[in-house]
Image: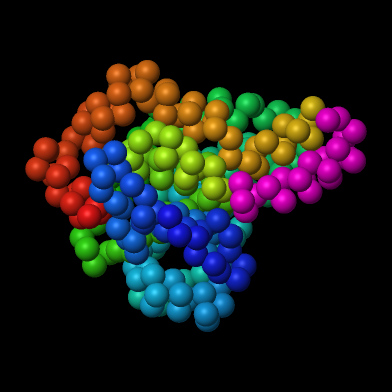
């Protein structure tokens, strides 16, 4: 896993270099996870397109998020909007309206929202994005998939991609937790601001935690899939419906 340093964009990284349980390695310059592509400099564009071969961007955000803060268009790069959520979800999506104190007071536990994102229509959307990323022709890579903070929707999709490729759960969780390197300072400032405004440690801590990657969040999502499908492998078989030959071809495409 390599962190890609861009001037104004944090939490942007290559999934290449991650090891699978059978000793293989995820190829670099194929799969990137990140945040909204905004305020790009010429140097950023060159790094993404020339150095890292970016060819496709998959935007997982809600329609409202894409309108409020649109991606900057890079010439020659294809863009797909594949929202995981159809409307705002407090604590996960980042529309302006979900940042009000009243909204944050009503925010459920983050682990509950992670469970929600792997059930019902949300899971359908995740499966669509997963299938799309795995089955692109080679000229469509590298691909970056992103939400607003690069933590929740992006984190779940990254976990599913890595699990499909044969990466063990602990390695997947450690990749997920890397987001804290970029979000910890913001979470601390938000905590202090909420504490000053509401004078409630409980409320301030709740908001702070929503900005961080916590083991229990991603474990809740993965455990829910295992409970509902028996195993993650069974989930992939039932929902992706790839033949054994297709699975082998896809894994060979991403692994060496």
As drawn, 255 above or below 216: below
Q: Residue at x 35, y 36 (%)?
A: 168
In the picture, measured across the screen, residue 137 lies left or right of residue 30, that is: left
Q: Quadrant of residue 22?
A: top left
**Magenta highlight range:** 180-201
Question: Residue 212's x, y, as percent?
Answer: 63, 41
Q: Nearer the viewer, residue 70 or 241?
A: 241
Residue 236 highlighted magenta (yes or no): no
Question: Residue 8's x, y, as percent?
Answer: 62, 67
As drawn, 52 above or below 238: below
Q: Residue at x 9, y 43 (%)?
A: 245
Q: Nearer the viewer, residue 181 or 73?
A: 181
Q: Quadrant of the N terminus?
A: bottom left
Asked whether residue 181 is in view, the answer is: yes
As drawn, 185 above or below 195: below
Q: Residue at x 18, y 51 (%)?
A: 252
Question: Residue 200's x, y, as percent?
Answer: 86, 30
Q: Quadrant of the C terminus?
A: bottom left
Magenta part mainly helix, strand or loop? helix
Asked whether residue 66 is in view, the answer is: no
Q: Residue at x 88, y 40 (%)?
A: 197
As drawn, 148 above or below 177: below
Counting the numbered discs, the total is: 0
Question: Residue 40's x, y, as percent?
Answer: 55, 73
Residue 195 highlighted magenta (yes or no): yes
């Amino acid at each position: 896993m390599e962190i890609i340093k861009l001037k104004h964009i944090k939490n942007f990284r290559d999934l290449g270099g991650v090891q699978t349980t059978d000793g293989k390695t995820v190829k670099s310059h194929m799969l990137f996870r990140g945040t909204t592509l905004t305020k790009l400099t010429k140097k950023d564009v060159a790094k993404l397109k020339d150095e890292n071969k970016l060819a496709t961007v998959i935007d997982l955000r809600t329609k409202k998020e894409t309108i409020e803060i649109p991606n900057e268009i890079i010439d020659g790069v294809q863009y797909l909007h594949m929202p995981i959520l159809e409307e705002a979800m407090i604590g996960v999506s980042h529309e302006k309206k979900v940042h009000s104190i009243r909204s944050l007071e009503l925010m459920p536990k983050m682990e509950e929202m992670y469970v929600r994102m792997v059930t019902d229509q949300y899971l359908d959307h995740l499966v669509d994005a997963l299938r799309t990323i795995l089955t692109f022709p080679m000229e469509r890579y590298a691909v970056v998939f992103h939400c607003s903070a690069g933590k929740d929707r992006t984190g779940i999709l990254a976990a599913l991609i890595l699990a499909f490729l044969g990466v063990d759960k602990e390695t997947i969780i450690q990749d997920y937790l890397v987001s804290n390197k970029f979000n910890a300072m913001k979470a601390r400032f938000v905590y202090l601001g909420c504490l000053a405004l509401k004078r409630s440690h409980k409320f301030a801590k709740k908001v702070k935690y929503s900005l961080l990657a916590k083991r229990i969040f991603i474990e809740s999502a993965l455990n829910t899939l295992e409970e509902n499908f028996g195993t993650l492998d069974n989930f992939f078989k039932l929902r992706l419906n790839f033949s054994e030959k297709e699975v082998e071809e896809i894994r060979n495409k991403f692994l060496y």
